[in-house]
Image (tube, rainbow, N blue to C red):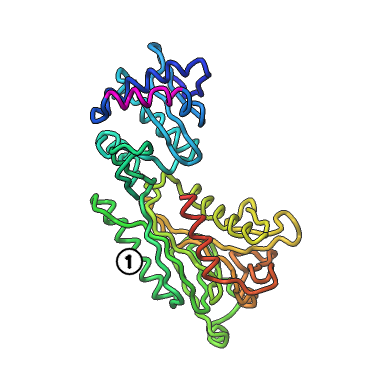
Amino acid sequence: MYPIIQPAPDDFDELTRLWEASVRATHHFIPETYIQKLKPLVWSVYLHSMPLYMVRGDAGIEGFMGINGKMLEMLFVHPRAIGTGVGKRLMHYALEHCHVRYVDVNEQNEKAYGFYSHFRFRVIGRDARDASGEPYPILHLKLGGIMKIENWGLVPYAEAWERQTELFNAVVEAKQVGEPYENRMIFVEHPHVYTLGKSGKEANMLLGEAQLKMIGATLYHIDRGGDITYHGPGQLVCYPILNLEDYHLGLKEYIHVLEEAVIRVCASYGIEAGRVKGATGVWLATGTPQERKICAMGVRSSHFVTMHGLALNVNTDLRYFSYIHPCGFMDKGVTSLQKELGCEVSMEEVTERLRKELSELL
């Protein structure tokens, strides 16, 4: 199997010929005059404006692609290599190594649309004309398609757990029988509550039932991973209910995405945050005696569909963490955006920033 490599400038003439041969074989709706109009631009502009990757075989270059950030700008396979898996190899490389999330495709090019649909790209928009203003409609595709965003407001934990479980089960069932479903990102706050994950230890809850009632809190044993944590007003909880296969993510990669989104949100407020080896979530002052957690995470996954998620302390009453060993740690502190910044922070603003970062990363 030939490796995927980056071409040298000496390869550009052959790449241009490959582009022309591929377009003639697959874009029957484009007239000859338009191909001749685009051809010099391919060599002089497009091939020089982005990183390129190609597969070279015994007969020459079999296929190539150009990537600009998270956008797959072009992917062309020589007619002699169609059906040999070259396109799929390039696409897998684009997803796994270049983290491509977007691609545009001519609406009339049904085979190309089918190819990208196989990789779980979905339509998120359409333009009636292409970038040159010609009447060839363009479909804008995104990996996983449009994610439904919901803000539930302040909801008791039991009610939210029941609602997200129903949505989670619906996605799992639809996926198993090949029916359509929606990926969702749910934002919510809860009244005072403690949740203990499947691997959690009862000893990490320091209060009994009577004491919980005195502070107006409840305790639930739930089906996510992780130990004990607290949810309450002023804490932003996010429950993504996603089919990870739509985003070509494994569970560890998904957790990394959640952490990265929160790290970026913290950075947007001038707060340096990071990860701690052997512990999920997002932390401040990592590797120092002042190490403290600002965001807890716990996820359940079945058939690569997720529920539960993350809890970011925004304006959280941190006293409630003193009644537990948060996430099972007895020697770690907790913090919030409010505590770090010295002022109350807009929940709406944090929600929008987190939504934006997650949407960009997924």
Question: What segment carries the magenta color?
Answer: 32-43
Question: How far across and down, in percent of the image, does residue 227 sit?
Answer: 54, 64
Question: How far across and down, in percent of the image, does residue 155 sit?
Answer: 43, 76
Question: How far across and down, in percent of the image, does residue 87 sit?
Answer: 36, 28
Above or below residue 148? Residue 131 is above
Residue 311 colored in magenta in the image:
no
What residue is at 32 percent from the left and 20 percent from the top?
21
| The image quarter in which residue 92 lies | top left
> Label 1 amino acid?
Glu
Above or below residue 85? Residue 244 is below
Number of numbered discs visible in the structure rendering: 1
Q: In the image shown, does 61 or 1 lie closer to the viewer?
A: 61
What residue is at 42 percent from the left and 61 percent from the top?
185
Question: How far across and down, in percent of the image, does residue 319 sit?
Answer: 64, 77
What residue is at 63 percent from the left and 57 percent from the top?
267
Q: In the image shown, does 243 or 153 lie closer to the viewer?
A: 153
Above or below residue 327? Residue 80 is above
